[in-house]
């Protein structure tokens, strides 16, 4: 029997996640591309990105989590972070437990929990407007950081979303990723 998640928008629809979550693949020191995860994962990359996340009880919302593989590695002990993944329904989630997974009805819908998250993760977002819409609607809440990860070639398209924020950037290969991937960490200026 499947376990439903909570009803995130109050309309009575719930997301059904698999009862038994798929076992996480063991990461290596070198970045490896896995099915359902745009970002190539490695031990050093996940450790670096985990170090950027707030400690519990604050939480991170990963917007567009796909299979949930990256997020599940962030949740894994011993230094687990509090991460909730959100994906468009029907979600392909295979790795995240129901308590750490939410869905929205389509790419134009926003997860209301974003207003309570201290950090947002956007890993290979599909469109610039999604980042801007989340910032406009929920950026004034508890949000302190936004982490954008994607192809270096796409960064110029997204850079404008973070005007007025303090942004630090680096190539992912400096911390265990692929050389064409890019990490931007934006901090809200108060």
Image: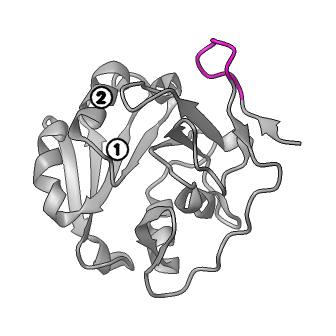
Residue 147 visible in the snapshot: yes
- In the image, residue 118 above or below residue 24: above
- Residue 52 is situated, as x and y percent measured from the top left of the image, at 43, 57
- Residue 9 is situated, as x and y percent measured from the top left of the image, at 58, 17
Q: Is residue 17 magenta?
A: no
In terms of depth relative to the viewer, which is nearer, 125 or 144? 125
The N terminus lies in which quarter of the figure?
top right
Which residue reaches farthest front?
90
- Residue 36 is situated, as x and y percent measured from the top left of the image, at 50, 62
Q: Quadrant of residue 133?
A: top left
Q: Residue at x 18, y 38 (%)?
A: 161
Q: Residue at x 17, y 46 (%)?
A: 158
Q: Which residues are magenta?
A: 6-13
Q: Are the residues flagged by discs 2 and 1 in contact, CB closer than 8 Å?
A: yes
Residue 183 visible in the snapshot: no
Disc assigned to residue 135: 2
Q: Residue at x 27, y 46 (%)?
A: 186
- In the image, residue 36 above or below residue 140: below
Mark 2 or mark 1: whose residue is earlier in sequence:
2
- In the image, residue 98 above or below residue 4: below
The crowding category of the residue bearing disc 1, from other C-alpha atoms within 10 Å (few below 14, some 14 to 19, many at least 20), is: many
- Residue 74 is situated, as x and y percent measured from the top left of the image, at 58, 60
Say what secondary structure mark 2 lies in.
helix
Say what secondary structure mark 1 lies in.
strand
Disc assigned to residue 146: 1
């Amino acid at each position: 029997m499947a376990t439903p998640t909570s009803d995130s928008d109050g309309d009575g629809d719930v997301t059904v996640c698999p009862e038994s979550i798929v076992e996480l693949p063991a990461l290596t020191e070198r970045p490896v591309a896995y099915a359902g995860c745009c970002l190539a994962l490695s031990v050093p990359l996940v450790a670096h990105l985990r170090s950027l996340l707030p400690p519990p009880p604050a939480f991170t919302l990963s917007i567009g989590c796909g299979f949930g593989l990256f997020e599940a590695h962030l949740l894994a002990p011993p230094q687990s972070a509090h991460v909730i993944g959100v994906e468009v329904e029907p979600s392909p989630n295979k790795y995240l437990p129901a308590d750490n997974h939410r869905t929205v009805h389509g790419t134009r819908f926003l997860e209301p929990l974003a207003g309570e998250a201290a950090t947002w993760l956007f890993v290979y977002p599909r469109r610039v407007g999604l980042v801007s819409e989340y910032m406009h609607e929920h950026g004034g809440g508890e949000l302190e950081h936004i982490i954008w990860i994607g192809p270096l070639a796409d960064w110029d398209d997204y850079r404008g979303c973070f005007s007025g924020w303090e942004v630090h950037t680096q190539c992912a290969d400096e911390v265990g990723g692929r050389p064409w991937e890019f990490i931007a960490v934006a901090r809200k200026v108060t």
